[in-house]
Image (tube, rainbow, N blue to C red):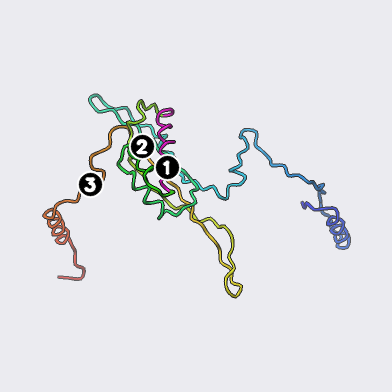
């Protein structure tokens, strides 16, 4: 089955008559407007129609759907955890990394203050994401006090590079202009932040013993 205009159909009909062949053709009337088909069970979403610039990191938000078994008697209650992310950030992950690491291990109020003091553009995005996650914690996850939260995880990943256009160089050689697209992910945890977020390095004696233990475990191939 072929879909063509009137002129193309006439030309195709003359060709088929000469070849003694039969074909089925449908003539579609030309229209000056465009109609986007919509499903009945789903509303029209412009991001689906123009989704070339929308890149989403799959899997991170699925941590919000995890159901843990009930705690036993005598155990401390499990703190609430809220995972949130922002997609399609037109910024390199190398430049965004400084703002993401800045708020690790801080309370939510202290992290927002640090983002206000920092003049980088990435810090403003981090502040907006933290405020969104804080509102989610109160409305969707039944956190009693919105200030009783701290940043357990904060990282950024580069998903892809978006093509913005072409640049003409010397001798007519074109080059593609690209922009990295990143995703910022954050995890808030209920409670007070730990005193030390990063684990301390062991002392020198412990490192020396571990090194000697690893050297004695070596296996020299093709030896006696």
The answer to whether 75 is drawn above or below residue 100 in the figure is: above
Element marked by disc 2: strand
Identify residue for label 3.
199
Q: Is residue 153 left or right of residue 122?
A: left
From what the image shows, is residue 223 above or below residue 96? below
In front: label 3 or label 1: 3
Labels 2 and 1: the sequence-earlier one: 1
Q: Earlier in the sequence, mark 3 or mark 1?
A: 1
With 148 as the anchor, is 141 left or right in this view? right
Label 1 crowd bin: few (<14), some (14–19), many (20+), radius 10 Å: some
Q: Say which quarter of the image contains residue 106.
A: top left
Cα separation between marks 3 and 1: 24 Å
Residue matched to label 2: 188
**From this viewpoint, which residue is outermost toward the bottom?**
171
- Crowd around label 2: few <14 · some 14–19 · many ≥20 (10 Å): many
Mark 2 and mark 3: Cα distance apart in space:
19 Å
Q: Are marks 2 and 3 in contact (CB under 8 Å)?
A: no
Residue displayed at 37% across by 27% down: 143
Residue 128 image offset from top left, x and y in percent: 44, 40
9 to 68, vertically: above or below: below
Considering the image in quadrants, where does the C terminus appear? bottom left
Label 2 vs label 1, nearer the camera: 2
Q: Residues within 10 Å of mark 3 (few under 14, many from 20)?
A: few
Q: Is residue 118 magenta?
A: no
Examine the structure image and report whether residue 139 is included in the region drawn in magenta.
yes
Residue range highlighted in magenta = 122-140
Q: Which residue is mark 1?
A: 60
Res 19 → quadrant: bottom right
């Amino acid at each position: 089955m072929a879909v063509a205009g009137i002129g193309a159909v006439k030309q195709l009909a003359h060709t088929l008559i000469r070849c003694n062949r039969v074909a089925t053709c449908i003539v579609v009337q030309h229209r000056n407007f465009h109609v986007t088909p919509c499903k009945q069970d789903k509303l029209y979403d412009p991001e689906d129609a123009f989704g070339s610039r929308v890149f989403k990191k799959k899997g991170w938000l699925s941590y919000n759907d995890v159901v843990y078994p009930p705690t036993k008697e005598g155990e401390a209650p499990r703190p609430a955890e809220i995972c949130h992310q922002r997609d399609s950030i037109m910024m390199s992950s190398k430049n965004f990394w400084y703002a993401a690491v800045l708020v690790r291990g801080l309370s939510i109020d202290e992290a927002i203050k640090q983002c206000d003091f920092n003049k980088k553009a990435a810090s403003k995005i981090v502040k907006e994401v933290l405020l969104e996650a804080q509102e989610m914690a109160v409305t969707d996850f039944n956190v009693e006090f919105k200030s009783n939260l701290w940043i357990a995880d904060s990282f950024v990943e580069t998903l892809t590079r978006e093509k913005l256009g072409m640049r003409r160089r010397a001798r007519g050689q074109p080059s593609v202009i690209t922009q990295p697209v990143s995703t910022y992910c954050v995890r808030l945890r209920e409670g007070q932040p730990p005193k030390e977020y990063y684990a301390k390095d062991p002392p020198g004696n412990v490192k020396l013993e571990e090194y000697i233990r690893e050297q004695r475990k070596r296996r020299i191939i093709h030896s006696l």
